[in-house]
């Protein structure tokens, strides 16, 4: 029987094989750990949401989905609104404004105003925590447009109750509603911008003239917070979320990638309608009545 003490020591080759096996096991464990960590702790993201058409029902539906996705996605830590729009339908603008305020309660939101952020589009922007714009961006146009009220006309086909059943009110009452919406628009801008990092320097009456300002003026008057690029806005959103390393993603792309089947088809159909929607043109078309618009467009 061989004495254990007399067994020969492991050869250099055996030791090398054990070391190599250990290195391989550790490498596999490290790679597996890396991907497990990526899955358990996703890379933080700053999401971009675009307001880049006239404001209407299709945009409202699209942004409802995108904002809700951004709220629920745990890897999206901050959002940048990229705005390039003349505004549009007043009710749709209000809807998006309130959605952005709700998003702001959950995650930092920074608005980046491009060439044009007017009327309803500007109101949407003031719901963000902070606003960036370029020096030449066109900003403001706080006001409301309404089509002319239609006179009460006796119908040969219908009988109505009350003097305003078919018109909704007198011309005077419609003008009063227009004034109320104008005041609501003005007050929302004043309230949001008075609490902003670069507070409002204009009086409420000065805000509500319907005037437009370029970015450098808007910064001086406290209508925006910073002059800078989209990249500056992204950096600021990341800073507000305390992010040092992050990805920048298009929320619409991320949202669509999360869908399949009928839900994906429905979302794609909505975006096709949004891309094909006709623009509101108050100068060449009869204005739909009753409708209120927060839209920048020169009227003849």
Image: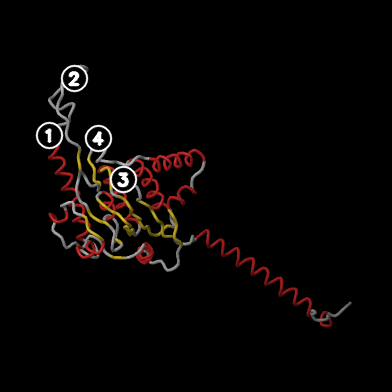
Q: CA distance from mark 4 to mark 1?
A: 18 Å
Q: Residue furthest right?
A: 1
* Distance between the alpha carbons at the discs numbered 4 and 2: 22 Å
Q: Which mark is residue 155?
A: 2
Q: Residue at x 14, y 26 (%)?
A: 152
Q: Which residue is mark 4?
A: 286
Q: Nearer the viewer, residue 283 or 22?
A: 283
Nearest to N terminus: mark 1 or mark 2: 2
Picture residue at 29% right of the left edge, 59% below the top: 137
Q: Do callouts 4 and 2 mark residues in contact (Cβ within 8 Å)?
A: no
In the picture of the structure, the residue carrying the numbered disc 3 is 55
**Residue at horizontal 23%, vertical 54%?**
140
Badge 1 or badge 3: first in the primary sequence: 3
Other-residue count near label 3 (Cα within 10 Å), few / some / many at <14 / 14–19 / ≥20:
many
Asked whether the residues under the numbered discs 4 and 1 touch, taking CB atoms below 8 Å apart as contact, a structural biologist would say no
Disc tally is: 4
Residue 250 position, x and y percent, is: 43, 54
Secondary structure beneath dot 1 equals helix
Corner quadrant of residue 12: bottom right
Q: Quarter of the image containing the N terminus?
A: bottom right
Whichever of labels 4 and 2 marks the residue nearer the N terminus, that label is: 2
- SS for callout 3: loop
Q: Are marks 1 and 2 in contact (CB under 8 Å)?
A: no
What residue occupies the far bottom of the structure in this picture? 6
Q: Are there few (<14), some (14-19), or many (20+) residues within 10 Å of tag 2? A: few
* For marks 4 and 1 on the same chain, the one whose residue lies earlier in the sequence: 1
């Amino acid at each position: 029987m061989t004495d254990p003490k007399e067994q020969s020591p492991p050869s250099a080759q055996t030791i090398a094989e054990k070391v190599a096996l250990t290195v391989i096991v550790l490498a596999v464990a490290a790679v597996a750990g890396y991907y497990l960590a990526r899955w358990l702790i996703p890379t933080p993201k700053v999401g971009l949401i675009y307001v880049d058409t006239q404001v209407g029902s299709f945009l409202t539906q699209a942004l409802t989905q995108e904002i809700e996705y951004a709220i629920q996605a745990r890897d999206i830590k901050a959002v940048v609104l990229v705005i390039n729009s003349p505004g549009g339908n007043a009710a749709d603008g209000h809807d998006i404004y309130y959605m952005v305020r709700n998003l702001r309660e959950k995650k930092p939101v920074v608005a980046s105003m491009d060439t044009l952020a007017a009327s309803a589009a500007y109101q949407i922007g003031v719901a963000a925590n902070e606003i960036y714009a370029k020096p030449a961006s066109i900003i403001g146009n706080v006001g409301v447009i309404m089509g002319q009220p239609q006179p009460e006309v006796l119908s040969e086909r219908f009988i109505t109750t009350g003097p305003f059943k078919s018109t909704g009110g007198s011309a005077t009452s419609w003008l009063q509603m227009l004034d109320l919406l104008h005041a609501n628009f003005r007050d929302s801008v004043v309230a949001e911008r008075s609490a902003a990092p670069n507070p409002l320097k204009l009086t409420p009456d000065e805000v509500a003239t319907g005037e437009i300002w370029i970015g450098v003026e808007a910064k001086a008057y406290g209508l925006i917070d910073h002059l800078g690029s989209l990249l500056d806005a992204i950096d600021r959103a990341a800073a507000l979320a305390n992010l040092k390393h992050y990805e920048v993603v298009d929320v619409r792309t991320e949202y669509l990638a999360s869908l399949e089947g009928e839900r994906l088809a429905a979302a794609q159909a909505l975006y096709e309608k949004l891309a094909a929607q006709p623009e509101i043109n108050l100068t060449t078309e009869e204005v739909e009545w009753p409708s209120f618009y927060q839209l920048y467009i020169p009227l003849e």
